[in-house]
Amino acid sequence: DRVNIGSIVPTVADEQLLSLLSGLNPKARTRTIVDSLMKILKLLQPFMIILEGDGDIDPSSWSLLAELMQRASAECPQIMLIVSSRDAPTITSAASNLRRNAVQVKLTPFEKYETELFLRVMLGVRNRDIAVDQKLLDVVHDRANGCPLFIECVVRWALEKNMIEYVEGSKKMSLKMLDERSDDVTAAIPRELSNILLAPFNNLPPPLWDALKIASCIGYSFDADLYSTLNQVLDFMPKIRELAVKHECFEQTGSHFRWKQQAVYEAVKSLLMVNQRQNIHRMIVRAFKQHKIANDDIDVKGGDVHRLLGRHCALAQDWAGAFEQYMKAGDRAKATFNFNEASKMYEEAIDFQAKMT
């Protein structure tokens, strides 16, 4: 009942499909790809496509999604497209129909009264005569910063520690005093949310912790085949699979891995200083360059290694390396007649060239 559309779309430019689509202009190629997707999606509807992550969507993918949604009303009406982004996504002109038809929803942190409503649901409090103690509400709202996912983490942690109880006399859900030597009942709940989120992983051996940190730098989701080069230097993917199976850190669909809890992903990222993250990105770039990944390998892995390395060079603040890799990514996109993508890659290269001066 689950289809990973992210495993379908990035591979539409592989060598075999390109040979079938050779000679078509980008618009005709997009329509041909959507023809194939429609045959699948008609059978799967009702269907929801969710694109989530930290980065922007590239222009060619916007074009594909725009064509998909334009056709959906007539051919596949029970389909919903959701694009989540930290910042307002830049919708290209090719996807103008999405601009007109999309509903933009801005998610903001909970106000305290909303935290209380969510807290009541989590505690199973349906009786309006039962209140939530103000200290309990204040500490949960403070630790979670109004984020529903973090509220859930704090409350589950407190429940596991038997720190929340119903007080018959006051008819309130309250924090239980665990340490009689302390006057502050809230002191037992860690101020740093990462301490709560990462507590299950405190006993991980250092090599697995290193793999978690590398994965947090790569992103919220990643493809094992694309990063298989790291296996030779760091034994990376075997450790990721161990973390997925034994410690439930990741969900796996085929070769695609995704953090099981975004809150844990954010917490691991927060442990790294800026220079530590930069060093990890430099290490990733070195691992790829040492093994001289060629264009023949790129198609097998279902992605453009130059664009991948350009991103890691940029995050390592290696502007010269980012310029070189994005130029190569643009050249490769142009060679496959993906001129929209080539233009985007060259623009990225120019931006990094400006940072070199």
Image: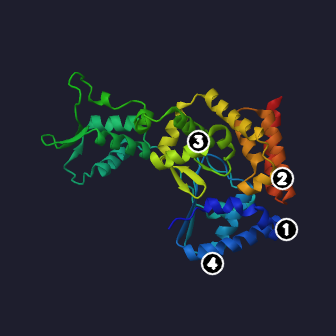
Residue 332: give its label: 2
First in residue order: circle 2 vs circle 1: 1
Q: Given the image, on which type of amino acid does mark 2 rest?
A: Arg
Q: Given the image, on which type of amino acid does mark 4 rest?
A: Glu
First in residue order: circle 4 vs circle 1: 1
First in residue order: circle 3 vs circle 2: 3
Q: Residues within 10 Å of mark 4 (few under 14, many from 20)?
A: some
Spatial separation of the CA atoms under disc 4 and disc 1? 26 Å
Q: Residue at x 56, y 30 (%)?
A: 272
Q: Residue at x 34, y 44 (%)?
A: 156
Residue 215: give its label: 3
Q: Secondary structure at mark 2?
A: helix
In-front residue for pair 2/116: 2
Q: Which residue is mark 1?
A: 22
Circles 4 and 2: CB atoms closer than 8 Å:
no
Circles 3 and 4: CB atoms closer than 8 Å:
no
Mark 3 vs mark 4: in front: 3
Spatial separation of the CA atoms under disc 3 and disc 2? 27 Å
Circles 4 and 1: CB atoms closer than 8 Å:
no
Q: Secondary structure at mark 1?
A: loop
Q: Which residue is mark 4?
A: 75
